[in-house]
Image: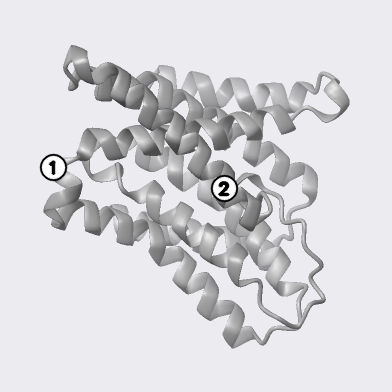
Amino acid sequence: MSYILLIISVLVGSLLVLVIKPNNKIVRLLLAFSGAYLLSVTILHLLPEVYAHSHDHDAKKIGILILVGIIIQSVLESFSKGAEHGHIHLHSDKSEFPWLLFVSLCIHAFSEGLPIHHANDNLLWAIIVHKIPIAIVLTTFLLKTNYSKQTIILFLGIFSLMSPLGVFISDKVNFFNEYHEEITALIIGVFLHISTIILFESSENHKFNFQKFAAILLGILLTVFTL
């Protein structure tokens, strides 16, 4: 079921663009909610789990791996131009396909799927909610380009399969089961980087925005009362 839901999340984001064409304000609210939800799940579920299963002498190693995950995501974002948190700073009239952006997004999506098999449903839903606004942004960008519909559908299809592939690999490949805590620590770093960037960027000119604050609070409360 997790495979299907992850694919559907990208489909939903793409269909929203085609059907209702959500404006920038709606996308920002979705991002704020998804960032708060993802951050809450990471802090309340993933972090305690990896430290609970690690020995005392492994605690520092877990912390280092989390920091490495933050660095890895920072490097990926230098190629993806911030698409993971709702921004694609590229000129959409270029005829050459932005391969670095697409590959970086696929690596990020693949990594998101790795801890799902060993986590509870809260992480799955956090990633699903996170992927919808990202799919909206990516679909909007692709539709503004000169690429054919077949090309757009192909690459959106590939992107939608990356997280399910991560779930499948983590379940079937022994390496990912043997080093589950270490890999989860890396992904925690990725999640911390993305979610905090989303929340930092949710405040425009450092002005209080009640709607975004409500979206963030809803994401946090939903996690607190469903864990």
Left or right: 59, with 65 as reference point = left
**Position of 182 relative to 216 (above/below):** below
Q: Residues within 10 Å of mark 1 (few under 14, many from 20)?
A: few
Q: Is residue 227 visible?
A: no
The structure residue drawn at horizontal position 57% and vertical position 24%, both measured from the top left corner, is 218
Quarter of the figure that contains the N terminus:
bottom left
Residue 69: image quadrant is top left
Q: Is residue 93 visible?
A: yes
Question: What colouring does the structure picture have?
Answer: one colour
Question: Which mark is in front, 1 or 2?
Answer: 2
Residue 178: image quadrant is top left
Q: Mark 1 or mark 2: which comes first in sequence?
A: 2
The structure residue drawn at horizontal position 45% and vertical position 57%, both measured from the top left corner, is 107
To which residue does mark 2 refer? Answer: 75
Label drawn at residue 178 = 1
Give, as a three-letter code, the residue at label 1. Glu
Q: Give how far across and how far down residue 100 sits, in percent.
A: 60, 66
In this view, the residue in front, 92 or 181, is: 181
Left or right: 91, with 154 as reference point = right
Q: Residues within 10 Å of mark 2 (few under 14, many from 20)?
A: few
In this view, the residue in front, 204 or 60, is: 60
